[in-house]
Image: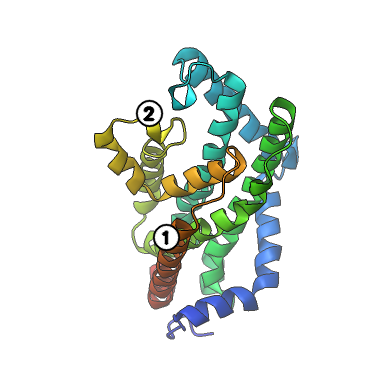
Amino acid sequence: MDPHSAQASSPLAMARTIWAHRALIWQMTTREVLGRYRGSFLGLAWSFFNPLLMLLVYTFVFTTVFHARWGGAGETGKANFAIVLFVGMIVYTIFSDSINRAPTLIVSNVSYVKRVVFPLEIMPVIGMGASLFHCFISLLVWLGAYLVLVGIPHPTALLLPLVILPFSLGILGVSWFLASLGVFMRDVAQTTGIITTALMFLAPVFYSVDNLPEGFKGIILANPSTFIIEQSRAVLVWGRMPDWFGLGIYAVVSLGIAWLGFWWFQKTRKGFADVL
């Protein structure tokens, strides 16, 4: 494969690439997940402990230090607050983990660019797969907490994959764009962490949208993760059906973003070898 040759960049080519390399994506995603904890004493068990410890810390800070209550209800206990908070954390972690790692995906795998015939376009897909794995582990932690503190989850919880899918598509498109941009502009990797941290506090992760002044709601609702966080809580915590119309629009927009990111990546990848 000539690294300087033009690569297919149509929406159909995007789908074909992911499907054709599905076995390689699975294999490398598994290696990515296991490699993150290789050499540590607890190994993969850290994927359970990390979200649990962060949940305990955030719950203590917001309920004990700041005396926060969800929706302003004084009777809302710490246990219920933790359950609602954790859903927001799980969803937003998919976004932050993928976006923060995207600018270094190509830079940290130079050998794939120069020495090996490798489908570089699947690198963001592998990163997304690793993020979704940790999301799944965090959901198991959430499920255990819900069973102990509340009871059996609502049947609507089974609809969560349909809520997360369009969100993942949009993130994948942004990851393709950032993976390419990170090759030519190394400062991108430094700025994404700042941006994702700021967006975390501009999303309803630690608070309810209903508690915000009317003048600020528009800013929070403009955050691309806000709608998915709210819909995830609707199906997991409140037992409500998702907003199908809103999800449909979100899916169309996310598909467009995914294709634009893929198109940008394919058009610029011919310059990777020259820069690296």
Q: Position of residue 194 (x, y in %)?
A: 37, 41
For the residue labelled by badge 1, is the local secondary structure a helix, a strand or a loop? helix
Which of the marked residues, 1 or 2, is nearer the chain's N terminus? 1
Amino acid type shown at disc 1: Val
Residue drawn at point x = 71 percent, y = 41 percent: 140
The label on residue 174 is: 1
Q: Is label 1 in contact with label 2 (beta carbons under 8 Å)?
A: no
Q: Which mark is residue 88?
A: none
Q: Which image quarter is the C terminus in?
A: bottom left
Q: Is residue 68 above or below residue 187?
A: above
Compared with residue 267, is residue 233 higher up or lower down, i.e. above or below? above
Per the image, label 2 sits on a secondary structure element best described as helix
Left or right of 154? Residue 62 is: left
Asked where in the image residue 237 lies, by quadrant, the reply is: top right
Q: Residues within 10 Å of mark 1 (few under 14, many from 20)?
A: many
* Kind of residue sitting beneath label 2: Asn
Q: Nearer the viewer, residue 9 or 74?
A: 74
User: Which numbered disc covers residue 211?
Assistant: 2
